[in-house]
Amino acid sequence: MSDATEAAPVETAARAPGLVARLRDNDIWFSFTRSPITVISAVVTLLLLLSALFAPLIAPHDPFDPATLSIMDSFFPPAWTGEGDPRFLLGTDDQGRDILSTILYGMRISLAVGFASVLFAMVVGVTLGLLAGYLGGVVDSVIMRIADVQLTFPAILIALLIDGVARGVAGPNSYQDIVFGVLVLSIGLSFWVQYARTVRGSVLVEKNKEYVLAARLIGLRPWTIMVKHVLPNVLGPVLVIATINLALAIITEATLSFLGVGVPPTQPSLGTLIRIGNDFLFSGEWWITIFPGITLAILALSVNLLGDWLRDALNPKLR
Amino acid sequence: MNPAETSLVSPGPATDAPLVEVKGLRRVFDLSKPLLNRLIEGGGRVTLTAVDSVDFSIRRGETYALVGESGSGKSTIAKMAVGLLPPSAGSITIEGIDVWGEKSADVQRRMRRRIQMIFQDPFASLNPRWRVGSIVEEPIKAFAMIPDAKDRAARVGELLSLVGLDPRDGSKFPHEFSGGQRQRIAIARALASEPHFIVCDEPTSALDVSVQAQVLNLLRELQERLGLTYLFISHNLAVVRHVATRVGVLYLGRLVEEAPARELFADPKHPYTRMLLDAVPDIEMAGKERLAIAGEIPNPVNPPPGCHFHPRCPFVMPHCKTVVPPVLARGDAGVRCHLFAEG
């Protein structure tokens, strides 16, 4: 009995203060509440995320169901202008698709590509950075020289290259099926260097600390030490880069789609929508391109502002 | 009743055979620039002999203290003894097993369990993202000593109370503790694998003076209770006097004097040891004449020939500058100095 009572606190007291209470106690929460811009951008980001996630429930129309589309509905301007139709709040495009609905659905694709490519870049970058920093020597040199070489190419160029190669290999018909994967791969591969460099730098600092020596002393394998001891201590800066990169990845995807190498018009992302609308800009149908453009700008801006705040909040020197 | 209780009994019968034997230990660091730079800029290899032919042995239950200035090779010896840094030459044998020569992975594993280390900086030696309980538990898990999670938690609580902390402290993070408490946690972690031999690398030098004595007393109490053997690294002679049974004095990687602690403090032989002792502030010494420390420790990359100490030695003789003095036995002690050659 006495054993059990002695053992129990170690297990249960771990979560005793409660997650919410601990969060409110935190200085990061404090700095969050003290920055109105951050609160606003967090709310905006959350709203956009939720509306993208629940697009099928929120969107007034399903823009990808040809049965609901009517060519008679095409080129309606926004509802508040004189010739608008109250059914289509932000107007319609050349095929009679509701702009608001296409934006909601488009945002899903933009965000999905953004999140997936950031995750991919993070996994690749963090793994390579850990290996380079912890193992050092030849492994370090090889990985970091590859990173250096890649940094001399603009990210968009690498993305275009991978996209072009994949398109050539897959052929025009099957390319439709793999386009999502190709986008994630090409955007992810152009972003991994930042993670690798940051993680390597932090690992070089952490690996000589005595807690790593203590772990080596009991014969833990290098990989176990890297993942269990070093990794948790280098994740802070990685989180910041990931947030800022999310906005960048969304913009890169939009750029690729705008250039016509991204997702096809049948499953449009925000970038595809802007490109489609671009064709009608000079004939006066401005709403087709402006509204997806504004959405993209707001999304990228609010995510970026969140990332900036996170960078400052996690940097003890700025507090 | 409690399975962990039995494990606290002192390990093995006390014998006179040494637990730790260090023979001809040597470590050379290569400080040369990369090959390409050497070819272009010229200049040959640059090496630093951090530890040079060091021999000593530690008996079971003893505290062997290594003292010396910064750069004398104390920490290098510590790292080689626990198996973190391979020696360039020589051997370290612990309980009859060669730390660096043992081939069998199984034997090596069992030996690792018996060697632990307490580090200098308690703010760097505990992973800041881990709860204290997990930190102390890790060696138990790594050596698969207690399979049941509940028993393991009980053992962690037991270890924490053994070092004078509350068992409930296991759920806290290291940053919630003071330096002395953190060092207690580090000691609890070191004890978790039930070691026989603990290397203490300046365990009190990062602590407040008021806390130093508490930690030292804890170490001594644990030694008596668990029959531990310590290799105690320090530059603080007052601390060494408090804990050591035997002392080795290092100068530029060489052991210049070795003696039982009482003897060394009462009757230091090597001029360097005498200098060190005279530099310790002491009320009893007031008014007596002191042997002032002259000069600074030379650059270890390019040490003086012969006896390394000759440029600072007040009793320097002509052949000190050319001939490396051998270890001369004086009863239970040993001294590396030409002064004692024809004693």
Image (tube, coloured by chain):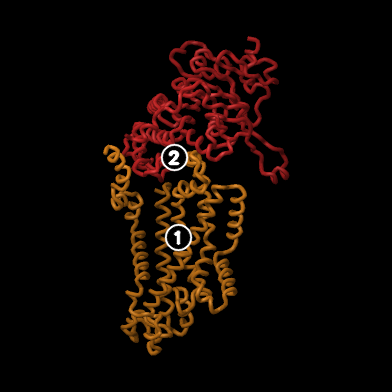
Residue B231 as seen in the image, left or right of residue B34: left
Mark 2 belongs to chain:
B
Residue at x 61% of width, y 53% of height: A142
> Which is more toward the observer, A265 or B136?
B136
> Which is more toward the observer, B259 or B297?
B259
**Residue B186 placement (x, y as % from top left):** 42, 35
- Chain seen in orange: A
Q: Which residue is mark 1?
A: A244
Give residue A184's mark.
none
As measured in the structure, the alpha-carbon distance from the residue carrying label 2 to the one carrying label 1 is 39 Å
Mark 2 or 1, closer to the camera: 2
Locate the N terminus of chain B and report the quarter of the image it occupies.
top left
- Chain seen in red: B
> Which is more toward the observer, A213 or B29?
A213
User: Quarter of the image holding residue A295?
Assistant: bottom left
Q: Residues within 10 Å of mark 2 (few under 14, many from 20)?
A: many
**Residue A136 placement (x, y as % from top left):** 58, 47
Secondary element type, mark 1: helix
To the question of a shared chain for discs 2 and 1, the answer is no
Secondary element type, mark 2: helix
User: Quarter of the image holding residue A88?
Assistant: bottom left
Residue at x 41% of width, y 36% of height: B192
Residue B68 as seen in the image, left or right of residue B225: right
> Which is more toward the observer, B137 or A288?
B137
Locate the C terminus of chain B and report the quarter of the image it occupies.
top right
Q: Which amino acid is tagged 1? A: Ile
**Residue A239 placement (x, y as % from top left):** 44, 55
User: Quarter of the image holding residue A293?
Assistant: bottom left
Q: Which residue is mark 2?
A: B139
Mark 1 belongs to chain:
A
Q: Which amino acid is tagged 2? A: Pro
